[in-house]
Each structure stands twice: as structure tokens, then as C-alpha cells.
Image (cartoon, rainbow, N blue to C red):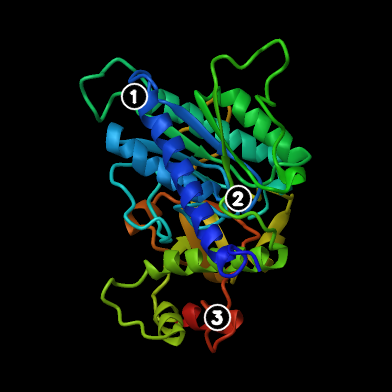
Amino acid sequence: MERGEMGGGEGSEEARGREREREWEEAAEAVAYDSCTWPPPVVVVCGPGNSGKSAFARLLLNTLLARYKRVAYLDTDVGQPEFTPPGFVSLHVLEEQAKDLTMLYLRAPKRCFFFGDVAAHKNPKLLLSYIFGLYDYFLKELYHFNEADNPHKSAIPIVINTSGWVKGIGLHVLSEILRYVSPTDVIRLNTTAEGKNLPGGAFWLDAHEGNSQVNLVEIRAVQNSPRHLLVKKEARIIRDLRLIAYFRQCLPRDFPIFSSEDLVQGIAAIDPFQLPLSKIQVIDLHSQISGDSVYDFLAGTIVGIGSSSSVPLSTECSSPWCMGLGFIKAIDIPGDCIHLITPVSHQLLENVDIIFPSCIAVPDGLFQVPDTVDDITARLRDL
């Protein structure tokens, strides 16, 4: 037996892991420090699913924060967002480094749109309008150069994280994003499965456009073995965890939770906010629903909530931006009332007059209570 055959596999794998870690760190530092100070970089992170885009984007955020103090983050992955529940396209401004790169946690976005699904292919045109609208908002509000001496009003860098949908229409969507944004840097993660990777070079540009103004950086993916079924299972678990963490905010911080039953009972005991049904406009983002039939399936679902008074973020997107998520506990049509559970403040809820239905699955057990929806409606009507 050769000397390296026994026990060498584990050691070599560890060595490869350290080498890949150094490669990632060097790529992040090159973007943050090798570029000129002005203007700050506009970075797009792309690659196939399960390649580590979000992990690298978080590392890049921390590296950029060490230099710029404030960094914008545009999350375009509606299925696996970094700082919001699933179903959102969101723009964030971060001012502190994430201490734990593996931790799942929520942040209040600067602005966000509700896509209402975890599958981007359901409506690529709508997805692109949201992304373009948020990027236009970033350019207008956060990337202007007339107050360089004021760190809170001067231009800041942005990291744009993309989904792992990189084939067929997905590649077209990514190309449209890259063309619209015109990034200074593109980080491309590659796996050992060449057929899953993106095309080489500045694939989004026409031949006559060239790529002299774009810094293309290729790094190895965090994982090289496909785990299709396991990845799908993990994706759903992570989505459920984000939704549970989001609605956990409805309860006081010191509310004692020692089991899932404690959480379910706590949320079931929340007094829902009452929205006047006649004031609400239901905007279905992906299909056409007519008449009162929309109320037949809204009860017991997760929805986005918004206000028609919100100003459009750009000419590319006239959709109202979203305040957050809600769970419709019951609908009382005779009483003209929607009973809604949400962590959104009551002050903001006073302005809510739009509900966006969604295809987002409710986490198993989170809102399960002994009463049926009809029983809840009847009981609330009698209060």
C-alpha cells in the first residue's frame, strides 16, 4: 500500500478545504482592496445551485464592511434568500459584520417586493422588474456621489446575490440582470460538473460589447458532489425555519418557548389585527382571480401586505413595495373583517390596503390550532 493511501483521503480533503477557503478570502479581498476607492464596486455573485453563492456573498459583505463601513445587498433569490423569509426580492444596507457565517437570521430590508412564490420560473418578467426597480432605487438613494464627506449619504458598494437557476430561461434572466446592472466585478462559482456551470467569459455581453470594464473572478464551489434530493429537502427546511423565525417576532422576546408546541400555542393565542375587508385590494401576482372567489382560499394562508400609497421605486417597476408577511387567521365577510397575524407594527398596518396572495407553504404545525378556520371565524364574529 502506498504511503498516502491510508488516511490520506481525509487529510487531502481537509487540505483542499483550506485551499478553497484561502481562494475565497483572496477573491473577496481583491474585490474590496485591489479596486480603486472610487466609485465603490458593484459585485454580482453567480453560479449553479448549491455552489456556495450565499456563503461567499456573506464573506464578501464582511470584507467590504471592513473598508466601506456600509454595504448594500440585493438578494434576488426568492427561494433561498439570505436575510428575509422566502418569496421576497429585497435590498438591504448593512453596517455591521455577521459574526457567524452559518447563522440564519432576519434583517429588515431597506425596500422589498413580494414575489409570492419560491420558484423564480413562475414569472421571470415580474422578477426582473422587481430587481431592476430595487437597483434603480439603490442608484438613486445610495450610489450618488455629491456628498462624499458624509458616509451616510455618499456612494456605497453593493453585492448582488443571484439564484442557482442558470440554465434555459434562468440563464436569460441572469444575463438580463448583468446587462442592466453593468457590474464592476462578477464572481463566478464553478463546480467540477462542467455541464452545470455557467458559460465562460462575459457570456451576457454581445461580441462587439467586449468585457474590458468587468473584473471576472472564477472560484471553486464549496461543494463538488450533487445531492439533488437532500438539497431539495434542506431547502424546504431552511424556508420553514425562516418563516417560523419571522412569525416568532409576533411574540414577546421573553416569551418562554421550550418546544414546538409552546410556539404553536403562543401564536394561536395572539389577538389578530383586524383589517377592514372593504378597504383591501387583492393583487394576485401570478394568476387572475375574479369576484369574491379570492376569499375562498385566502383564510389559512401566508400573504404579503402593502399599501397603495407607496411611491414606485423606479420607472422599471410600478408595483407597490411590500411591508412584510401576514397569516390570515380568518375572514369574516359579513363583519367586513380580515383577521391577520403579523409582526409588522400596528402603525404601519393602519396604511395597509393591499394583500398579495402567495404560493408559500405554511410550515407544518406552525398555525395548527384545535379550531377549524370556520370555527375561528364564527367565534371572532361573536366577540
Give me the disc on residue 365.
3
Say which of marks 3 and 2 sits in front.
Answer: 2
Q: Which residue position is annotated with label 1?
A: 155
The image quarter containing residue 237 is: bottom right
Q: Residue at x 34, y 59 (%)?
A: 346
Whole-Å distance between the Cαs marked 1 and 2? 30 Å
Q: Which residue is mark 2?
A: 51
**Based on the displayed image, in which of its 4 quarters is residue 146 positioned?**
top left
Which circle's residue, 1 or 2, is located before the other in the chain? Answer: 2
Q: Residues within 10 Å of mark 1 (few under 14, many from 20)?
A: many
- The amino acid marked with disc number 2 is Ser
The residue most toward the top is: 208
Residue 294 percent coordinates (x, y): 68, 60
> Three-letter amino acid code at disc 3?
Gly
Rendered residue at 65%/63% (across/down): 231
Q: Which is nearer the N-term, disc 3 or disc 1?
A: 1
CA separation in Å, label 3 and label 2: 31 Å
- Name the disc covering residue 363, or none: none
State the residue in front, 157 or 328.
157
